[in-house]
């Protein structure tokens, strides 16, 4: 029998349950009282004790060219907002008295929006009591921000007037779209790196965020720095701005001429592997060519005939043939295991009997494929192993996101001795650049190794990392392969590649001023399952080589993808190579200044507004003037500076010829000087083109209107 006495226990349980219920009701009641009757009191207590940890963004590092020119730099930009209840208090009277003046001032600064529209928009935020109402939706530069900050109410402390900002680091490229895919880009709204060197070296460029505590004491906020931000470091690239510009212009001109779909050009320094220029142009919907993808490192394709020197290098290095070995190409058509191999001139009777050297000079498909098939048919893996020795299949560890390493498959057999991934025709077609996948950067690295007497250098994009003028990290040249073949083999190929240009199919790539070596390539582009001949045939045209051939300084590859005929690697890509080579070599021509001096004439150069220090240096070097008064007018009646100087006075001298309240004349100036002078006068500047200012949209001498946009056209 149970000893539980319900008559005694149940009343106790009931009493406990009632007590807990009453306590719960009391707690809920007290909470409701605090949330309603005492809400204002506790809100004020909480506001006095607010303490936030805020992140302080560092300044992103710069990206510079090999000679120190800015290719990407950070400047502050702002988004502006209004808090209509700063410190929890409304600003009714102050706002009502000043709203008309504020909107008129905003209209002067932002003419695209009327004062009436500003008032309607801001009144809506005022009526809502918004704490973070946008005054202007786009980002503005520092000069515009200072103008806005001068307006009534906005000039007050943000805890009294309510005007506040969000600051961003905006990325600007002084040279516009030049090398844009290599330098990289940013997602502006997120301040995060998108591609190129910006993304690959993001951790170095970005720096480290700082932390500050923001604490409210009574009605004032106090910021207490905890950890200061560490600004990002600068990176010095290998890109040469002038060479990049030459390569871009040469490639785009030819793409427009031949109606090309895509083009790539890479210029590399032979001794170091430094990439001096890399161009990636794609035709957009509007017909213009822009850098959309970094095809130079990511577009793996069948390279075509520029691959043939690698095949012959393997055969020469293995000793199975020499350059005098004769191939009977017949009338230009040969049966290769059931498929017909054709030379480009098969309709004209072919080349008949030619040796190995001549086969490369005229880019004979039969000549190269016959040699490889004849001596490696039974052991194709030895041929592929030889290709691996040449370095053309190496992973170059390119420090850019998107790099695709080559795919050259190795023949494999199963246990029964049957080929798993190979066919009878694989070897002859692989030997002439098909059935492989190689990006242009790997091909130019291979040709660079030939120019460098067999030493393959890894392509280098960044030389060093600099901070506060001190080098904190260096990236020396890296040898990818000490030797890609025997010394005799590389010397033989150097001679043959020079003959390709001097007496073969690559004549248009040559120059009358210096010797050029290289190889043409014209390949049909596969369309996947559709094959090579569905619809209009696409072609991959290329020329790879180096110059000058006797003392190689630079290697270069130019590739063009186009649809339909005519299509010629030597006649199209080779012509671009020619323009790049002559443009680059022209920079190395040094003439004595005495040859250009006319002793019977005395000329005083005209000096226009701009960098006084630089002008003074040039004039002193020419022996014209130095640290003395310059007077009179130039050849067009333009006044010149009054006195050369340095330091703060140089800024004033840049404005000496501009009447107060009028638009300065910046024609003939460099971009940086022109932008500085116009923005210092309150104008907003937009650049179009590269070089010096040829024309300006705001006529010189007209009435100056702050906030007005002035477009500068550079040439």
Image (cartoon, grey):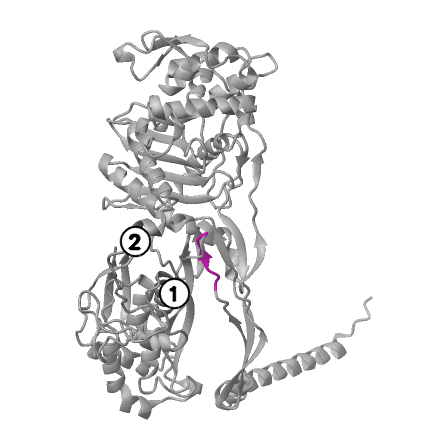
Residue 702, quarter of picture: bottom left
Residue 69, quarter of picture: bottom left
**Residue 639 shown in magenta:** no
User: Dot 1 corresponds to which residue?
Assistant: 617
Q: Residue furthest front?
A: 600
Residue 620 visible somewhere in the drawing:
yes
What secondary structure do most residues of the magenta stretch adopt?
loop
- Residue at 29% across, 22% down: 533
- Cβ atoms at labels 1 and 2 below 8 Å apart: no
Tell me the quarter of the image containing the C terminus: bottom left
Tell me the quarter of the image containing the N terminus: bottom right
Please, is residue 646 above or below residue 180 in the view? Answer: below
x and y percent of residue 704 in the render? 21, 76
Residue interval drawn in magenta = 60-66
x and y percent of residue 255 in the render? 27, 38
Q: Give the spatial CA distance, label 1 vs label 2.
A: 19 Å
Q: Nearer the viewer, residue 595 or 400?
A: 595
Please, is residue 427 above or below residue 452 in the view? Answer: above
Residue 504 visible somewhere in the drawing:
no
Residue 380 vs residue 73: left or right?
right
Q: Earlier in the sequence, mark 1 or mark 2?
A: 2
């Amino acid at each position: 029998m149970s000893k539980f006495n319900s008559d005694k226990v149940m009343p106790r349980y009931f009493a406990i349950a009632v007590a807990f219920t009453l306590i719960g009701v009391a707690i809920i009641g007290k909470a409701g009282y605090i949330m309603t009757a005492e809400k204002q009191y506790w809100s004020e207590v909480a506001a006095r004790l607010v303490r936030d940890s805020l992140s302080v963004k560092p300044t992103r590092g710069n990206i510079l060219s090999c000679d120190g020119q800015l290719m990407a730099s950070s400047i502050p930009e702002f988004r502006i907002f209004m808090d209509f209840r700063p410190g929890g208090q409304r600003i009714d009277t102050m706002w009502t008295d000043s709203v008309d003046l504020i909107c008129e001032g905003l209209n002067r600064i932002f003419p695209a929006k009327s004062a009436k529209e500003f008032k309607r928009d801001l009144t809506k935020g005022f009526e809502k009591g918004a704490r973070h109402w946008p005054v202007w939706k786009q980002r503005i530069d520092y000069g515009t921000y200072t103008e806005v900050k001068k307006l009534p109410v906005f000039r007050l402390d943000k805890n009294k007037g309510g005007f506040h900002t969000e600051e961003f680091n905006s990325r600007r490229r002084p040279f516009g779209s030049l090398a844009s895919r290599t330098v990289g880009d940013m997602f502006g709204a997120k301040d995060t790196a998108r591609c190129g060197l910006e993304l690959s070296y993001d951790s170095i460029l970005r720096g480290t965020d700082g932390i500050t505590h923001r604490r409210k004491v009574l009605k004032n906020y106090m910021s207490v720095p905890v950890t200061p931000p560490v600004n990002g470091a600068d990176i010095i690239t290998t890109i040469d701005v002038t060479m990049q510009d030459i390569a871009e212009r040469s490639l785009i001109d030819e793409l427009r001429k031949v109606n090309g779909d895509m083009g790539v050009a890479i210029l590399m320094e032979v001794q170091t592997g430094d990439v001096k220029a890399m161009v990636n142009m794609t035709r957009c919907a509007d017909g213009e060519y822009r850098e959309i993808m970094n095809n130079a490192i990511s577009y793996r394709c069948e390279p075509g005939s520029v691959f043939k020197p690698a095949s012959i290098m393997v055969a020469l290095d293995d000793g199975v043939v020499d350059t005098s070995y004769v191939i009977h190409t017949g009338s230009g058509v040969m049966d290769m295991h059931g498929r017909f191999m054709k030379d480009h001139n098969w309709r004209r009777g072919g080349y008949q009997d030619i040796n190995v050297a001549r086969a490369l000079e005229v880019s004979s498909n039969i000549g190269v494929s016959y040699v490889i098939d004849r001596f490696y048919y039974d052991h194709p893996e030895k041929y592929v192993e030889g290709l691996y020795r040449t370095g053309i299949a190496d992973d170059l560890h390119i420090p850019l996101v998107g790099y695709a390493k080559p795919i050259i498959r190795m023949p494999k057999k199963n246990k029964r001795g049957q080929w798993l991934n190979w066919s009878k025709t694989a070897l002859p077609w692989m030997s002439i650049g098909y059935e492989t996948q190689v990006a242009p950067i790997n091909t130019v690295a291979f040709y660079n190794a030939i120019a460098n007497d067999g030493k393959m250098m890894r392509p280098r994009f960044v030389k060093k990392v600099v901070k506060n003028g001190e080098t904190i990290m260096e990236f020396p040249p890296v040898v990818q392969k000490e030797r890609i073949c025997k010394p005799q083999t590389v010397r033989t190929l150097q001679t043959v590649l020079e003959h390709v240009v001097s007496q073969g199919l690559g004549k248009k790539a040559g120059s009358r001023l210096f010797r050029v070596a290289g190889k043409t390539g014209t390949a049909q582009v596969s369309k996947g399952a559709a094959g090579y001949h569905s619809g209009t045939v696409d072609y991959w045209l290329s020329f790879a080589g180096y110059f000058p051939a006797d003392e190689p300084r630079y290697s270069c590859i130019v590739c063009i993808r186009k649809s339909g005929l005519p299509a010629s690697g030597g006649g199209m890509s080779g012509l671009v190579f020619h323009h790049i080579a002559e443009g680059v070599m022209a920079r190395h021509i040094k003439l004595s200044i005495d040859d250009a001096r006319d002793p019977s004439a005395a000329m005083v150069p005209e000096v226009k507004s701009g960098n006084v220090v630089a002008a003074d240096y040039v004039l002193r070097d020419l022996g014209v003037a130095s640290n003395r008064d310059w007077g009179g007018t130039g050849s067009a009646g333009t006044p010149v500076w009054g006195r050369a100087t340095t330091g703060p006075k140089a800024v004033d001298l840049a404005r000496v010829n501009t009447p107060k309240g009028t638009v300065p004349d910046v024609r003939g100036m460099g971009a940086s000087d022109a932008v500085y002078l116009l923005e210092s006068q309150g104008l907003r500047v937009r650049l179009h083109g590269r070089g010096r200012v040829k024309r300006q949209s705001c006529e010189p001498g007209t009435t100056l209107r702050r906030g007005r946009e002035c477009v500068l056209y550079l040439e």
